[in-house]
Image: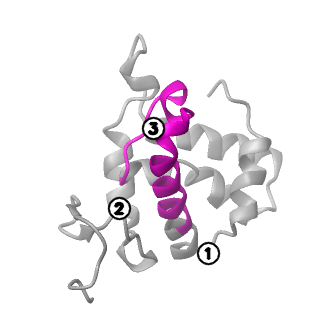
Amino acid sequence: METTSRNGAWIRTVSGRKFWPNDPRPEDVNIHDIAHALSNQCRWSGHSDQFYSVAQHSALVFDVIARRYPVFVEMQAAALLHDAAEAYVIDVPHPVKRQPEMEWYRHMERRVTDAVSERFGIPRTSSRTTRSRTPTAY
């Protein structure tokens, strides 16, 4: 893996890999890193009565989609990984993320999401469809 021509600084993941948030590539994405990181991150910036991880949320969204659309495996994969970028570029609360000056962050998050989608063969349209068909209460 070529590391000398990467853009920006890198983070070391739990598996020991290097990941460049400013230069994400599908070959740098690892499912174990995603599962580990998301299981340690609390939803809603930690403002919940009990610890509720992003991984738990992802599993619930997967379950909803799998029951509603049992033959659409691609959509189920998109549901499970819809927040996978947060393993590499931690989530920012929605009111903050939507500020115009946060466009740089939204751009980085989209690029990481694209790398995750490409790594696991999930078309971007599946991710958008999954988001539109899942209740936001989870």
Element marked by disc 2:
loop
Residue 48 sits in which quadrant? top left
Q: Say which label, 1 or 3, has the lower sequence index.
A: 3
At x 54%, y 43%, the residue is 58
Above/below status of 67 relative to 84: above
Which of 30/62 is in front?
30
> Which numbered tag is attached to residue 54?
3
In this rendering, position of residue 33 left or right of residue 26: left
Magenta span dominant secondary structure? helix
Determine the CA span between mark 1 and mark 3: 22 Å
> Which residues fall within the magenta stretch?
88-114
> The C terminus is located in which quarter?
top right
- Location of mark 2 (residue): 21
Q: Position of residue 86 (x, y in %)?
A: 43, 47
Q: Residues within 10 Å of mark 2 (few under 14, many from 20)?
A: some
Q: Residue furthest bottom?
A: 2
Q: Say which label, 2 or 1, has the lower sequence index.
A: 2
Residue 41 sits in which quadrant? top left
Foreground tag (2 vs 1): 2
At x 48%, y 28%, the residue is 96
Q: Look at label 1 and name its amino acid.
A: Gly
Which of 50/71 is in front?
50
Q: Look at label 2 and name its amino acid.
A: Pro
Residue 106 located within the stretch drawn in magenta: yes
- Location of mark 1 (residue): 121
Foreground tag (2 vs 3): 2
Determine the CA span between mark 2 and mark 3: 19 Å
Q: How many marks?
A: 3
Q: Look at label 3 and name its amino acid.
A: Val
